[in-house]
Image (cartoon, rainbow, N blue to C red):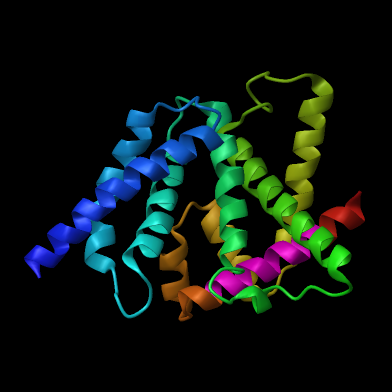
Amino acid sequence: MVSENHHLYVEGVNLLRIAARRLARRLGQRVPLDDLSSYGYSALPRIVSSYDSTRSSFATYARAKLNWAMLDGVKQERRWLFETARAGAIGASDRFAEAFDENEGAAFSLSGDAANQFSDLLAGHAAAMVLGMTVAREGIGLGLADGRGNPEEQTVAAEMAVTLRRAVQELPDRERALVERHYYDGERFDHIAQELGISKSRASRLHAQAIATLSRRLRESD
């Protein structure tokens, strides 16, 4: 077991190097690579010990977990305000995309022809990014209380925050709990799923459904 864990840890370190460089690019190269790697290294022992070989390959499991660990690390920092908001948007979009991986596409029911399906998918990603970024900005006061941005931008940001809050409150109970606890309260997604008594894949589907609903509400509000 020790030998196996050591092998997985070495593989995890190699995966982390690739994942950190990729995330650094997605964050506009504004967060130091060493900091991203540090967040991943801190999570790696937990990732190795929690891996279940009967569910997926280690590479698939570790890449996702390392990505979440690095995004969470950025979101908890106050050194990079704009990058915190971007990390929130990326994390929400990636979480939405999870429902389409490994044959879970049925989690998000798309209707109509291929063009409409693709449009709905893009709208879902857009809504997820708006949710992640808006909650992150609201949490750190970016562009609202610190005087950043012009008055019109601050007003739009404030109105969007209120619109999202109302839309989230109207979600079904479990979907609302997932969104509120993960985005607004900063709780880990897997912990929320466990406390709700549902599987991680079920939580992923509920999250996708919640984002789809929020997407429709945002388009109606426009």
The image shows residue 175, relative to residue 39, as above or below, that is: below
Query: How far across and how far down the image is residue 4, in percent?
Result: 14, 66
Q: Residue at x 37, y 51 (%)?
A: 66
Give the main secondary structure, helix, strand or loop, of the magenta stretch.
helix
The image shows residue 213, relative to residue 39, as above or below, that is: below
Q: Residue furthest left?
A: 2
Of residue 37 and residue 172, the one placed in the foreground of this image is: 37
| 127 lies left or right of 68 | right
Of residue 26 and residue 126, the one placed in the foreground of this image is: 26
Which segment is the magenta one?
203-215
Query: How far across and how far down the image is residue 1, in percent?
Result: 10, 70
| 6 lies left or right of 100 | left
Q: Residue at x 78, y 19 (%)?
A: 150
The image shows residue 128, relative to residue 157, as above or below, that is: below
Query: How far across and how far down the image is residue 60, in percent?
Result: 40, 63
Q: Residue at x 63, y 38 (%)?
A: 138
Q: Residue at x 29, y 75 (%)?
A: 53
Query: How far across and how far down the image is residue 116, in percent?
Result: 87, 65
Asked which quadrant contains residue 135, the reply is: top right
| 1 lies left or right of 181 | left
Q: How many marks?
A: 0
The image shows residue 190, relative to residue 160, as above or below, that is: below
The magenta stretch spans residue 157: no
| 110 lies left or right of 199 | right
